[in-house]
Amino acid sequence: MRSADHNRADARGNAREQTYGLRKSAKTPWGNPIVYFFSLVLVAICIVPVLYIIIGAFRSNSQITRSPAGMPNPWVFDNYITVFTSTVFWSELLNSLVVSLGTMIGVVALALMVSFVIARYRFKFSGVLYSLFAAGMMFPITVAITPLYLLLRNLSLVNTHLGIILPQIAFGLPQAIIILVPFLKSIPVELEEAAELDGCSRLGFFARMVLPLSWPGVATVGILSFVASWNAYMLPLFLLNDSSKFTLPLGVQMFSSQHSVDTAQVLAFTSLSMIPALICFTIFQKKIVGGLAGAVKG
């Protein structure tokens, strides 16, 4: 009898909890409206300037002067056509692609190898090595720009794309290793032991198992390093003095100084220079979020 009474009491308690949960969910089906409000404000702060640049390039200079915050009336396409037909824009776009892709490949390849050693090998100073790379995130490239310039000048790498790629790889490694090490640690040891029993070497296990399983982290590291290199301004400004080797950030600055009175043209050049990075983030945003979430979880 006592057990039956306890069962009925538990059933009534569960029913009350379910009813309370349903009432609570019915009251706030969309979550906290304050959170949504501040989220929308942050999204507007990020998107409105970008939309202003893109839409402003469809206006003439007289329209911008009369109404700086107005919509195009009529829509003018000549600004984008002029930039598209310019050989300077395509030359700087190619330079940015070379530098960004070279940086991305170097960061991903080296970070994978270093992270594999730290995560899968057991040696005395593995924790110290990981902490050393983590400490590297506290030193931005702007802090070391003067000694870095002197070093690259002695190596005859000034005014070369390689002189930009190598330092960007070095300063991009700490973040990449911080992201990749948790992914590689999460791979079960039993999987590696099974691969060894099947005759798979360390390099074979790295190529056949580690790379596919750590793909979200690899994608995150690659995208972040590509976008960071695409938007880099300080290092190319110090190293490049030949306009034919300028990247797009330097090209935007040079174009805006040469066409300071043609605001519409400057907006068109600026919007076209940032579209590749925006497309990259838009397409791979889920992989970026998934990779960062996996790194934090690890």
Image (cartoon, rainbow, N blue to C red):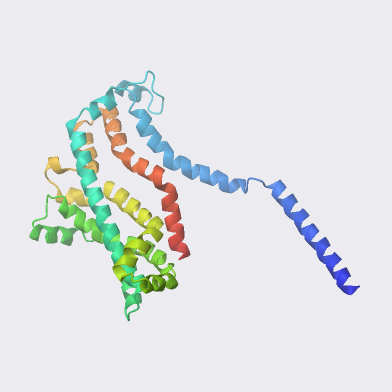
Quadrant hosting residue 138: bottom left
Nearest to the observer: residue 101 or residue 1: 1
Above or below — where is 7 with respect to 142? below
Q: Residue at x 24, y 44 (%)?
A: 97
Q: Residue at x 18, y 37 (%)?
A: 91
Horizontally, residue 219 falls left or right of residue 28, namely left
User: What percent of the width, then of the height, locates residue 205?
Assistant: 34, 67
User: What percent of the width, then of the height, locates residue 282?
Assistant: 40, 42
Above or below — where is 97 with respect to 171? above
- Residue positioned most to the bottom: 124
Nearest to the observer: residue 112 or residue 56: 112
Horizontally, residue 254 falls left or right of residue 270, namely left
User: What percent of the width, then of the height, locates residue 253?
Assistant: 23, 39
Q: Where, quadrant-wise, is the C terminus in this rendering? A: bottom left
Question: How many numbered marks are there?
Answer: 0
Horizontally, residue 94 falls left or right of residue 30, namely left
- Residue positioned most to the right: 1
Above or below — where is 261 with respect to 175? above
Q: Looking at the image, can residue 28 be seen? A: yes
- Residue positioned most to the top: 74
User: What percent of the width, then of the height, locates residue 113?
Assistant: 29, 65
Quadrant hosting residue 213: bottom left
Nearest to the observer: residue 140 or residue 20: 20
Q: Where, quadrant-wise, is the N terminus in this rendering? A: bottom right
Q: Residue at x 16, y 62 (%)?
A: 147
Q: Residue at x 8, y 60 (%)?
A: 154
Q: Looking at the image, can residue 133 be seen? A: no
